[in-house]
Image: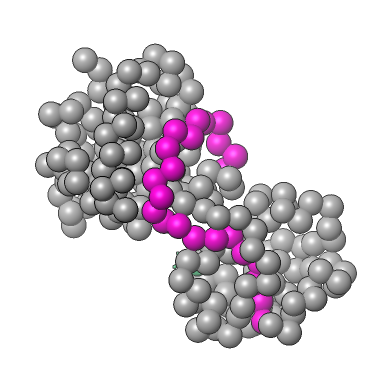
Amino acid sequence: MEWLTVAIAKGRIEKDMNKIFYEIGMGDWIDQGSRKLVFEDHVNLIKYIFVKPVDVVTYVEKGVADLGVVGKDVILEQEGDVYELLDLQFGKCTFAVASFPQNKQFRLKNNIRIATKYPNITKKYFQKEDIEIIPLNGSVELAPIMGLSDVIVDLVETGNTLKANGLVVLEEMMPISAKVICNKVSYRFQYEKIMSYTRKISEGREKYN
Ligand code: PRP
Ligand code: MG
């Protein structure tokens, strides 16, 4: 029997996945708080690797990992050539354009300055419009406050970060949740094992949600 390698996005998604693994009785390998990055489940022959969300798609696309668990936001931004097998129904949030309420007419402006961690998604969404993308790596909500941009494109989950900074959603763009992705070659050659694994995850997800 062959091993499967699964790349999991560190952070919020990792925590939700651990709950699912316990739910389906496949969590014996979990060692929370450990600094280890590779774990082996010798019962089910699954190797788990923990990487930054943006790197999950790379590991899966290159075939180093057969499967990955990561947010749809990252999949869209990376434009990874992978299959999406399962919507996990957690990590739910919305992509939105946000700013101060008085900027709600931002589309009337020439050369709209947009700060974001997601330049590709932003470019696609605005298409032909006259925009300047200001790429940032985090705390994007600061940009309009500091006058660096007119609006931001970012994820909104509870809305607390926007609210705490006096910002509001001006346009909702698309819903986001965590997904299981698959390498295209693995999908052909390890089909049975991948299907039985994702079926178990899917059952765990239903119990957990
Ligand atoms: C994310 C996102 C928003 C916030 C949304 O930031 O970029 O800022 O969470 O969540 P909320 O609507 O519940 O407040 P994150 O905490 O991941 O930090 P970063 O943007 O600095 O990377
Ligand atoms: Mg943020």
Residue drawn at x 24%, y 39% as measured from the top left: 38
Q: Nearer the viewer, residue 90 or 2?
A: 90
> Is 103 placed above or below 187 here?
below
Residue drawn at x 50%, y 30% as measured from the top left: 83
Q: Nearer the viewer, residue 205 or 45?
A: 205
Can residue 56 be seen here? no
Does 87 lie within the magenta span? yes
What colouring style does the render use? Answer: one colour
> Is 50 placed above or below 99 here?
above
Percent from the top left, x then y, of residue 44?
A: 18, 28
Percent from the top left, x then y, of residue 110?
A: 87, 69
Left-right relation of 52 to 119:
left
Left-right relation of 113 to 40:
right
Quadrant of residue 135 in the image?
bottom right
Residue drawn at x 75%, y 69% as measured from the top left: 113
> Is 84 placed above or below 189 here?
below
Residue drawn at x 26%, y 48% as measured from the top left: 207
Quadrant of residue 40 in the image?
top left
Does 199 lie within the magenta span? no
> Is 69 placed above or below 169 here?
above
Percent from the top left, x then y, of residue 182?
A: 43, 30
Question: What's drawn in magenta, residue-wise?
Answer: 78-100
Percent from the top left, x then y, of residue 194?
A: 34, 25
Left-right relation of 192 to 136:
left
